[in-house]
Amino acid sequence: MLIGDLAARTGTTTRALRYYEEQGLLESGRSPAGYRVYGPGAETRVHNIRDLLASGFTVENVKSFVRFLDSDLPEVFAYSDSCAANHRVGAQRVAELNERIESLTRMRDTLVHRMPWLGASTVS
C-alpha cells in the first residue's frame, strides 16, 4: 500500500507517517519508482501509534511499546511483571500530566483571582 493510501485508511497525514518512520515506529519498503510501500500490518501499527498518542503518551513513550504495535492493543492494559518497563513509562507519563494539570489549574485560579468578573461559572 502506498503512503497516500495508508494515510487515508488511518485518518492521518503522509507527513505524520513519514515522521513515524523517522522515529523508528513505522517501516516501509520502496517500489521500483522509489515510492514508499507499506505491508499489510502497517494499518494496525498506525492505528495503535495514534491510539497511544491520543491516550497521552509522547512519541518517545510509544517507542517503548513498539513490540506490541502490530496487533490490536487491549482497551485496558493488565499489569504483568514482564511489562514492568512499559508500566513505568505509563506511570511517569501520568505523573508528568498531573504536574501539567496542577500548573494549569494554578494559572487558571490566578487569572480568575485577578479578573473576578470571569467568575467560577465560566470555568469548567
Image: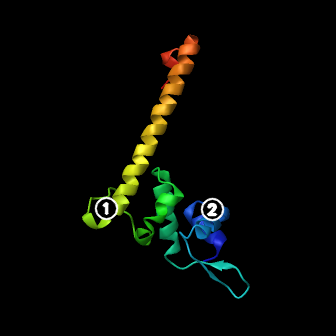
Q: CA distance from mark 2 to mark 1?
A: 29 Å
Residue at 58%, 60% in the rendered image: 11
Specify whether residue 44 is in view: yes
Q: Is residue 29 left or right of residue 40?
A: right
At mark 1, the secondary structure is helix
* Circle nearer the viewer, 2 or 1: 1
Q: Residue furthest right?
A: 33
Residue neighbourhood size for the residue with mark 1, other residues' Cα within 10 Å, grouped as few (<14), some (14–19), many (≥20) = few
Q: Which mark is residue 16?
A: 2
Quarter of the figure that contains the N terminus:
bottom right
What is the three-letter code of the residue carrying label 2? Ala
What residue sits right under mark 1 in the picture?
84
Image position, residue 47 (x, y; %): 49, 63
Residue neighbourhood size for the residue with mark 2, other residues' Cα within 10 Å, grouped as few (<14), some (14–19), many (≥20) = few
Residue at 45%, 32% in the rendered image: 102
Tell me which corner region of the image, top left, top right, bottom left or bottom right, holds residue 5. Answer: bottom right
Residue at 66%, 78% in the rendered image: 36
